[in-house]
Amino acid sequence: GNSVTQMEGPVTLSEEAFLTINCTYTATGYPSLFWYVQYPGEGLQLLLKATKADDKGSNKGFEATYRKETTSFHLEKGSVQVSDSAVYFCALSSMEYGNKLVFGAGTILRVKS
Amino acid sequence: DGGITQSPKYLFRKEGQNVTLSCEQNLNHDAMYWYRQDPGQGLRLIYYSQIVNDFQKGDIAEGYSVSREKKESFPLTVTSAQKNPTAFYLCASRSGVSNQPQHFGDGTRLSIL
């Protein structure tokens, strides 16, 4: 079945540091890939998405590239801010799986000033 | 503003009680979903509905029930058969167009008295 694996956290960085959160997936067919962010006590917000191989999703300085050859969708940001502290979820959906979202376990990011 | 409204934000249940969580969307989305989130874990799918008057079990449906009588509404009932109901519950919706992301509400936190 479909599955998503994310790097374990928490990830602790100083402000302005470079961020990478690894995400790999297993899926049948051609999934769409997503990164969601969750701030404390809130629901999930879509951060970015990519729907086919080599697509790059980007938003608010975050980027991720859909790599079919390595089945990866790593999240990156060149310079993190304290306000980026949150939980980040990688997820996929595919038509073969009824468009249901399959989530990774989430990665806690803590940014210190 | 279009969006998903979950209510209440906090809910308390006594042993042996059923409680119903509300989810309303004005995005004209066809599909709606309920997830459960436990501390430090990812999201698990409880039930989903792709059209009005139809719904399917997700991965952890036992002890829960839903209805979808209107496109805008997808209430979740946590029954007394759910032995460990304390969790954060998230509702999401999605348009019927392929490759579109799910959009989430702000969640309801359910606790047992």
Image: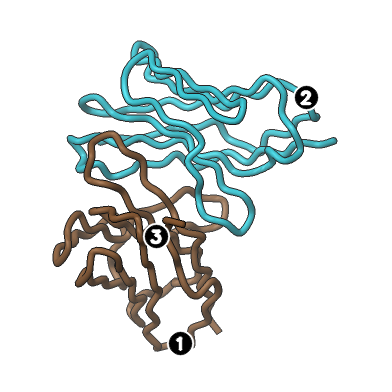
Chain colours: A cyan, B brown
Of the 4 image quadrants, the one containing the C terminus of chain A is: top right
Q: Nearer the viewer, residue B2 or B14?
A: B2
x and y, in percent, of residue B64 in the image: 31, 71
| Kind of residue at badge 1 | Glu
Q: Nearer the viewer, residue B83 or B108?
A: B108
Of all chains, the one bearing label 2 is A
Q: Residue furthest right?
A: A113
x and y, in percent, of residue B4 in the image: 42, 60
Q: Is residue A95 left or right of residue A10?
A: left
Dot label at residue B15: 1
| Kind of residue at badge 3 | Cys
Residue at figure coordinates x 44%, y 60% from the top left: B90
- Calculate the distance from the C-alpha at mark 3 to the C-alpha at mark 1: 24 Å
Q: Secondary structure at mark 1?
A: loop
The answer to which image quadrant residue A4 occupies is top left
Residue at label 2?
A16
Q: Is residue A101 above or below residue A66?
A: below
Q: Secondary structure at mark 3?
A: strand
